[in-house]
Each structure stands twice: as structure tokens, then as C-alpha cells.
Amino acid sequence: MAENTVVQDAKAVKSEPLFGKKEKKLLLDPLNDNNPITVQVLGICSALAVTSLVYPSLVISVAVVFVCGFSSLFTSLIRKNIPKQVRMIVQLVIIATLVTIVELTLKRYNFTVYKQLTVYIGLIITNCIVMGRLEAFAMANKPWRSFLDGIGNGLGYGVILIGIAIIRELFGKGTLFAGSPAEWKIIGPTADYMINTLADGSWFGWYANNNLMVLPAAAMFIIGVFIWIQRSYYPKLVDIS
Amino acid sequence: MHSTSYIVRFVVIMTALVAFFLALLSTGWKDQIELNEAIFNKRAILSAVSDYLGDQDPKEMSDAEVIGIFDSKVDQIALDMSGTPLEAEDIIASGYKGGRAEDIDMAKEKKKDEADRILPLYVFNSDKGKIYIVSVRGNGLWDEIWGSIALDGKLNVVGATFDHKGETPGLGAEIKDNPAFPNSFKGKKIYNDDGDFVSVTVVKGKAGKNNDYAVDGLTGATVTAVGVDEMIRRGIKYYEPYLQKAIAQ
Amino acid sequence: MELFNIFIKAAFIENLVLAYFLGMCSYLAVSKTVKTAFGLGLAVIFVLGVTMPVNWVISEKLLSEDGWFGVDLTFLRFILFIAVIASMVQLVEMIVEKISPSLYNSLGIFLPLITVNCAILGGSLFMVAREYNFSESIAFGLGGGFGWFLAIIAIAAIREKIRYSNVPPALRGLGMAFILTGLMGIAFMSLMGIDPTALTAGK
């Protein structure tokens, strides 16, 4: 939940630059210091299941950035009119609408990718990161800043997601961007990479794909290690529990 | 604190706005989305006969090319379980308004009793004679799996494609994602030398290079592989009455 | 016995947390002690068991082309599902408070957390994707909830013990919780071999 997120100062200073230091901080902090996954523990759900391949992860990341940014923007625009008692439902309706738009857009313009992702698109709604940012930031800040905060957090999420996917796909399948128009077969012979990796003619033909990497559990290990590395560099992030 | 009537008004107006916008979007794009779905299915069917399409890879064809080739070279026939071809009104009576074989929803058919099912058969007219593309559907590890199997005039397998609803990426999903798996079906036989139906077995581990009746299984996806095996065995059998008559001619 | 199969599958083989990562946020945040984990786990079983059939009715009768209105309204599915979940949670909270204040005291604080628990909406979306019927949806809801309950109890118990181990400081807490979840996921994968049909057929 959003317990350990810092609610930034809500008071807006007049005549500030459109993209000053504060705005830059909002956009870039979530990439490391305040990363939604490794620091805020938000949004680990749902979309991780697609991280065994880079391409679907990329699409999901773009979708999350879009939903996160615009739901923050819209919530912030109407934040003073939202009745407190039903604010959760209102936020969820905004998120669900945006996710439905993403789903329809994919169905309309890239049906193949839609077929790959199916239910995972809908699960963006339950991605706690979106809701968490609305509650912790957009409800108390001006639209433009909320928008940047949403985009920043979406990006921070995407970076981790794609990072995990690169490791999993590279070591698990020997490819990158499999399923997309630009598929790179990196490890193993160009053809039949999964069934016969030993008889080769290409680079790293000796490498046998690591099946652990394609299991859901691998994503957990990789995030664990990411957190370990990050906290070794930034000891202030360590918690004791 | 807002009053109750304000809350009610707020919620009603917001819901109405959102519903209106989404309805607009959804109806506006409905036709294109349905067309996309049809092209998606046709592309999958053509992938099963990719060897007969020359240099063209069904995966890279444009939408128009897919429709063009499908309409010019593929005949579609709907069959009942005894192998009798059905008329358009029979298909409509089974609940498919379009009245064509391509309108048949295999997922719906799978839920019916075996005897009541109707089957779509696609006949691809290649330079080397007719290729019969049968549709099969079964269960994988998590959910349903399905595919198209292409059989030549001697009823040997000349191509296959598979798809799935929710198999694990990298494991069961390899039936679709790894082209080596469907390709390994090419050249396999479904009848033994005595003319008995034996299907193609998906073995656990390696099938051996000279085995005409088996393909390699998938590492770490035993349940999906067993599902594919069962699906093909049962699915092709459904078409047997018609196919035997058709090749005897 | 089809229903029993679905229950077993949802609870063990297709565990919402360990196989689909659903509900990870509250799973990690509320798994520091077994006692709180127990409360949240119970609440999840309850809410999943209630929302699943309600969402089934919405999806099949209200939104489907074959439903009461005869119009395809599936584009409203996400919104209605999440609204049902949010209001169900609210309703459950009020009912529990009225009927059993003692249960409310132990469960109450977790209930609002559940609205944003991904496992609930995820469950409903899977239910639609797998085309379950009404009674199957209840079995799936209860099974999924039970699986979630098991997973959070297990991780909480391990986290209680691991506090006395010498874990590298940077890995303590969150990092270790992820790695433990991964190990538990692998352990649960060994249950994949279970064939529920064989269990019920008495083979």
C-alpha cells in the first residue's frame, strides 16, 4: 500500500516554470530513489506474469505509463469536486475507463499484441501503483505535476519490468523481443534454438537455456536481487522488519 | 463533507459521461475489431500451409493479402460429425449467423455433446493438389489450446499451427512461440502401414529422427504436450469419415 | 465433482499469488506477522467468494449479448467489476460490523485494503476468460481465496522465523520476502502434477 510514500508539499507556488527542478524530480525520482516496485512496494501484481518476454512487457509498460499519467491528470483536475465518501470508486472508474480505452485501441490497431496479452491488459486496473499514486499524490496536487508524477511512476515501473524481462528472456530463451517484428535471436543457433542448442554454428551455441528463468519464480528472484543491489548502494532505503 | 444528493448527482453524471464515451468508441470500432479477428484467424489457418505459399510468410503478409489469398485459394466446408457437408442454413441453425464455416466457433462447439458438433474444414487448392486443413481444440495446462493441422492428399501432415489461451510463457506457450514445435509435425504420418489411424504422438523427451509418428515434447511443459497429443488424436479423428471419402475420389 | 476440481485447481495448482502474482501488494505489506496475515486471508476468501458470483451475473446477464438487454455492453465490464468489488467490500464491512463486532475488530481494518487487492479483480477477469458457469464461479472464488490465504499464512510464518537469521542487511525485509515467494512458488509448482479428475474419480 501507499504507506511509505512521501506526500509532497501540496502548496503550489505561483508563477513557477513549466518544467523546473521540482518537475524534473517528480519525473526522475521514481526511476531510482522512489521506485514504485523496489522502494514503494506497489504494483508488483499482475503484469509481472508477462515478464518472461521483453515485447509484451514493453507494451504493458507503455500502457501503464499512459494509464498512470492520464488517470493522475484527470483525478487531479476534478480532485476538488470528488466527494470524499466515494473517492475510491471514482478513482477506480477513471482507471477502468482508461484501461478499457487501452484495450479497445490494441484490439483496433494491433490485434496480434492484444491476443498475446488478453487478461493482463485488464489487470492494469488492479495494478496498485496507479491507484496508489492517485491517493498519495494526485488527490492533493495540481494537474500538471500530478501528470508528471504519474508518468514518472509509470516509467519507474516499466524500467524494472523491462529489466526483469531482458534477463528472463535472454537467459531463458536466448532471444530478445521474440514475437515482435524485430526479433533478435542472440544465444544459440539461429534456428531451433529451444530444441537443439548444442549443434550450432552461431555464437554461444554451447549455452543451454535456463528453464528456471521462464518460471514465474524467476521474476521474484530477480526483483529480490534488484532490491539487494539497490539497497547496498543506498543504505538509507533499508528497512528492518 | 458533501451532501448525499451531491454525491448521487456526481456519480450519475460521471457514470453517464464515461459510459457514453466508451459506447461511442466501442461501436465506432466494432466492425474493424471484428475484421481484425477474422484476419487473425485466417492468418493462423494460412500459416498451417505456409510451405505452399511460395516466398510469402503468412506472419508478414498485409491484411489485404491474407484476405486475398484466403478468398481465392481456400474453399470452406462445414461438416457434421458423420462427415456430411452442411448447407448454409444448417450452420445458421447451429447458431452462427454468418452461415459460413469460418463463422463456426470451436470454443462453443467444444462445449456441445460430441454427436451434435459441427466442424469447419478448409481446403487449400495448392499447385500440388488439395490440402485439407482441420481445426482441433483441446485442453492445455491452464486453459484451452487449439490449432490447425494441414494434411495432404495422402493424409500426411504437411503443416501445423497452435495457439493457446493461457499457457505459461516460455513453457507451454512454446507450442505457439517456438516455430520449431509446429514445424516438427511436417512430414509426420497419421496412418500406420496397415492403414490404422495412429495419429502423431507428442513424446516426453526426444522422439528420434526416423520416427514417422512422433515429435519431440516440450521441456518443462509435459501437461501442455499431453494436451496437444490428445487434441490432435481426437480432433483429426472427427474429420476421418469425410477425409477418407474425399481422398478416395 | 467438477466443482471440487475447480476448487483444488484454484487453491493449489493455479495459486493466485504464486502463479499469477495477484494481490502481491497487500501480500507483502501485511505478511509481517501470522496474526494479521490470518485476518487478511480470511477477508480475501470472503470477498472473493461473494464478488465472484455477483460479477458472474453482471457479466453474463447484464453485459452479454445473450443477456437480459440483448446488447453487447462488454466495454463496461472493467468499470462494473471494480465498482461491484468496491461496493461489496463496503457492504461486507457494514454487515460484519452490525452482526459481529468482535469479528469486525479483527477483520475490519483489512477490509478497505481488499478493494485494491489485485487478486479480487484478477479472479473475476479469469472467471470471464475461462467461461465458468454460476456454481463454478463460486467454487473458483472460494478456491482462489483459500489459495491466497494459504500463501500469505505461509510467507508470514517464514518471515517471523527469518527475523532471527543472519540475512545481509540490504536483503532484509522486502528483498528476502521476494526471494522466499519465489522459492514458495517453485514448491507449489510440484503440485502441478496433481490431476484433480483422478482425485475425485478415486483412482
Image (cartoon, helix red, strand yellow):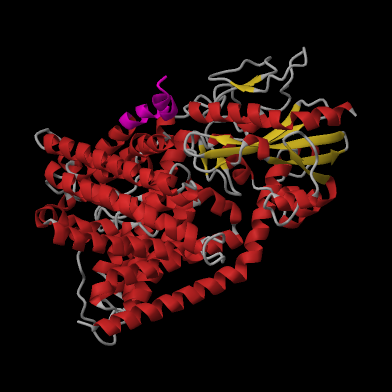
Q: Main secondary structure of the magenta part?
A: helix
Q: Position of residue A32 (x, y in %)?
A: 29, 56
Q: Residue at x 53, y 46 (%)?
A: A177
Residue at 56% across / 42% down in the picture? A184
Work out which residue is located at the far right of the displayed protein and give it. Answer: B249
The answer to whether residue B53 is above or below residue A85 is above
Give how far across and how far down residue C62 sits, in percent.
48, 63
Q: From this viewpoint, is residue A6 visible?
A: yes
- Which range of residues does the magenta coloring cover? C187-203
| Residue B8 found in image quarter | bottom left
Image coordinates of residue B206 in percent, x first then y, are 57, 18
Asked whether the viewer can see residue A18, the reply is no
Instruction: Indicate yes or no whether the magenta region holds residue C189.
Output: yes
Front-most of residues A43 and C44: C44
Q: How many marks?
A: 0
For the residue pair B155 and B3, the one nearer the viewer reads as B3
Which residue is more in the foreground, B148 or C50?
C50
